[in-house]
Amino acid sequence: MEYEIKFVLFYLLLQLTLITCSFFYYNNYIKNVYLKNGKLTFFAGFSQFGIFTVHAFLLYLPNFLFTNWPKIEVGTISFLTGFAVCSISLLILILGFVNLGSFLRTMGLNSSKLKASGIYKYSRNPQVMGYGLLLAGFGVFWPSWYIFAGLISYAFIIHKMVLTEEIHLENLYADKYVSYCNNTPRYFRYSTK
């Protein structure tokens, strides 16, 4: 039991370290690249995969390290709920990527036109929401403290990424982007106003 407590503390420290590193990465490196170039460089665009690769690795680290880690059996309702949430999240992800257009746009390498139609009428960041829902769906499939910790760290990391992108988009599109922000929620509409 003592070893498990040490691992839990170590794991939470790893997640906190990733959040802190991501904060400095987006606040210093990515923001400066956006401001200097008006878009992300190839390296900066693809370097973001590193943050999310480490996040994904940490998300499943306990499963890899502990083959005898207590497995939680989920019932039919939980399975169907998790399946529905994951299916909806994949649909949102696909619609977001297809609606955004080219892979270069997705990576922030091409910002020639503000995308405010399709699924982007309902959320300025549908991919972010889709992936967050996917993590929540995994949490329903495999309920555990470390999936919950991963979902919380994702929320902090992705929010910093979105805030950094918003600085770039406001600089690039000025009043047009401000108007878009006034009409479209950052993540999702949480009221009926």
Image (spheres, grey):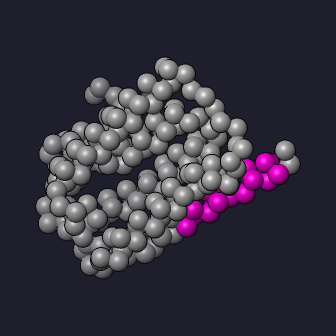
**Which quadrant holds residue 45?**
bottom left
What x and y, as percent, mark residue 88?
A: 33, 34
* Magenta stretch: helix, strand or loop mostly: helix
Residue at the (14%, 66%) spot, across then down = 112
Image check: 171 left or right of 43?
left
Residue 184 visible here = no
Image check: 5 left or right of 84?
right
**Which quadrant holds residue 91?**
top left
Total labels: the figure holds 0
The stretch in magenta equals: 3-21
Residue 141 visible here = yes
What x and y, as percent, mark residue 109?
A: 24, 70
Image check: 172 left or right of 126?
left
Q: Residue furthest front?
A: 67
Q: Nearer the viewer, residue 155 or 99?
A: 99
What x and y, as percent, mark residue 31?
A: 38, 71
Q: Which quarter of the rendering shows the N terminus?
A: top right
Q: Is residue 157 magenta?
A: no
Residue at the (48%, 48%) spot, across then down = 155
**Which quadrant holds residue 74?**
top right
Q: Which quarter of the rendering shows the C terminus?
A: top left
Q: Is residue 16 magenta?
A: yes
Q: Residue furthest top?
A: 77
What x and y, as percent, mark residue 174?
A: 20, 61
Residue at the (36%, 74%) spot, across then down = 44
Q: Nearer the viewer, residue 19 or 101?
A: 101
Q: Is residue 128 above or below residue 47?
A: above
Residue at the (17%, 49%) spot, across then down = 99
